[in-house]
Image (spheres, rainbow, N blue to C red):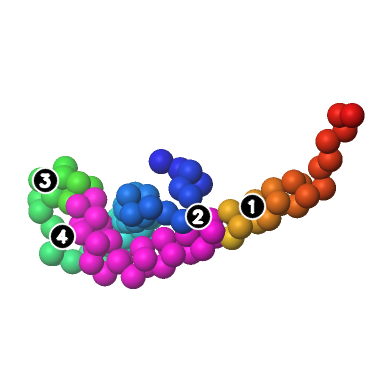
Amino acid sequence: MKIENLTANPLPDQNKRLTHEARKWVAQTFFGTMLKQMRNSPFKSELFAGGRGGEAFGTLLDQQLAERMSTGAGSKLVGSIVKGIEVKNQKAQNAKQQLQRSHVGTTTDHRA
């Protein structure tokens, strides 16, 4: 789903979709990257050690942890992103409406 497709005054359903997409983005780009770096760090903790199973399924664990982290600690970041997008969309819609109004006032009917 593209964020641009959401209106400036989001309906509750659109706000939920935008929040869901922002949460996925935060989980993948911020927390996912952090967990990957922690796993590959020479100073990694034994907390993430899991033997062969840990090696095979470590990325799946990281994905689940990132999703959980984005709903908990990342909720403020997600909220800020959603608010910023909604404000930007509102400004764009206001500018579009103002431009449409200015065109309506300047167009004349040339049919005689």
Reading the image, the residue beneath label 1 is 97
Q: Is 57 part of what is drawn in magenta? A: no
Q: Position of residue 91 (x, y in %)?
A: 59, 60
Q: Earlier in the sequence, mark 2 or mark 1?
A: 2
Most frequent secondary structure within the magenta stretch: helix
Q: Amino acid at mark 2?
A: Ala
Reading the image, the residue beneath label 3 is 52
Question: How far apart are the two marked residues, 3 and 4, measured between alpha carbons?
Answer: 12 Å
Question: How far apart are the two marked residues, 4 and 1, measured between alpha carbons?
Answer: 53 Å
Residue mark closest to the camera, 3 vs 1: 1
Write the residue at 81% across / 42% down: 107
Write the residue at 24% across / 50% down: 63
Question: How far apart are the two marked residues, 4 and 2, measured between alpha carbons?
Answer: 43 Å
* Label 1 secondary element: helix
Left or right: 50 in relation to 66: left
Crowding near the residue tagged with mark 3, few <14, some 14–19, many ≥20 C-alpha atoms within 10 Å: few
Q: Position of residue 49 (x, y in %)?
A: 13, 58
Reading the image, the residue beneath label 4 is 48
Write the residue at 86% across / 29% down: 111
Looking at the figure, which quarter contains the N terminus?
top left
Residue mark closest to the camera, 3 vs 2: 2
Q: Earlier in the sequence, mark 3 or mark 1?
A: 3
Residue mark closest to the camera, 2 vs 1: 1
Rendered position, 85 above or below 55: below
| Res. 62 in view | no
> In front: 72, or 57?
72
* Label 4 secondary element: helix
Q: Magenta segment range?
A: 62-90
> In front: 14, or 103?
103
Reading the image, the residue beneath label 2 is 8
